[in-house]
Image (cartoon, grey):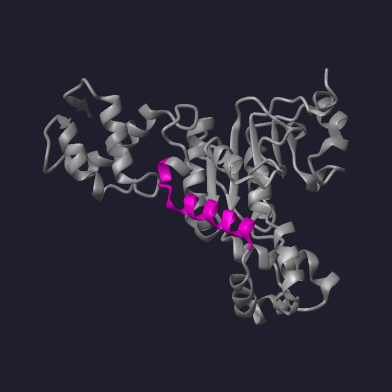
Amino acid sequence: MSEINNKIIKINPDVVFYHIEKCAGSSIENMLYIYFQNIYLDKEIYIPKKNDYNHYKEEQKTFFEENQFRVILSHISFNHSLSIFPQHLSITCIRNPIDRLISHYYYFDFDDYKVPLHSLNEEELLTYINKKLAILWRISGETYNIDIAFNNLKKIKIILIFEKINDDIVKLNKVLNHYFDKPNLELIMNKSNITTNNYYSENLQKDINSIKQLNSSKLNDEIQLYNYVCEMDDADRFNLKYDDAVNVDDVVDDVVDDVVDDVVDGLVDGLVDVVDVVDVVDVVDVVDVVDVVDVIELVDDVVDDVDELSI
């Protein structure tokens, strides 16, 4: 066995939250920890705040293999050579790369530099940026390779967006409840590790302008990655098309259940035609779970050879 294979941490978790720095990761970790305590034993959940180790890395190989955690909530890079997991429910959250970079600087590094980010000279600023692109670094498995990052991105089951976090938590709650068959569990997010340095808010626009004036190919790659996620529809970001993420029949049942109250009196008497479901689905409060078009596609896929749905 090669040296690298000897270093691989061999565990088979059910769920992994890939915490990217300054993307609401600590808040999401804590929220998921509370949620999964209702499903798993506490000893089956790894979260840095309750363990001696703060990061998932090679030096902790024995620790992780001995504990065989089923849920990992931690700073961890997707498909890293030391931690390639079998099939699992993967979750992450990304953020506007420039905003994330500035927040990272003032939270982690300001005390070392002691000046606003835009006060760094061009060489210092470019060097800092290229070393701190956490989204590209984490999603590419710590390679900074944009092609690997895009390939890995397509494998991540649930991708939250920092700028949409409140709405995304509602959607994540519904997906997890379907996935684990826990209809009454609620995700509650309390914000933590917020960048409160006054320099952050006072210098934000100047910092943004300074970063935009630089030509960092790595930053451009990360922005490309972020824009790609922002253009994804909910069905792809929450992977509702996967049977292991949410049961398609359950989605259809939910649609029918919601539609009944709105259409049974005016449109139908005993049966709901598929066409009627499609016609009225836009008045049903399911659009916060998945785009209407995707609901229609799911209905079409499941009832392809059926003319009517019983209510």
In this rendering, the count of numbered labels is: 0
Q: Where is residue 33 in the image (x, y as percent from the top left)?
A: 68, 43
83 relative position to 246: left or right: right
Q: Quadrant of the C terminus?
A: top left
User: Residue 85 lies in magenta, yes or no?
Assistant: no
Q: Quadrant of the N terminus?
A: top right
Q: What stretch is highlighted in magenta?
A: 216-235
Q: Position of residue 168 (x, y in %)?
A: 49, 51
Snapshot quadrant of residue 37: top right
Residue drawn where x is 16% and y is 24% of the image: 307
Q: Position of residue 21 (x, y in %)?
A: 70, 55
Check the image and report above or below for 44 versus 197.
Answer: above
- The answer, for residue 61, to whether it is visible in the render is yes
Q: Residue furthest bottom?
A: 202
Residue drawn where x is 36% and y is 27% of the image: 249
User: Residue 224 lies in magenta, yes or no?
Assistant: yes
As rendered, which of 270 and 238 lies closer to the eye? 238
Check the image and report above or below for 126 versus 160.
Answer: below
Q: Where is residue 146 in the image (x, y as percent from the top left)?
A: 59, 46
Main secondary structure type of the part rendered in magenta: helix
Q: Which residue lies furthest to the top in this view?
A: 1
- The answer, for residue 19, to whether it is visible in the render is no
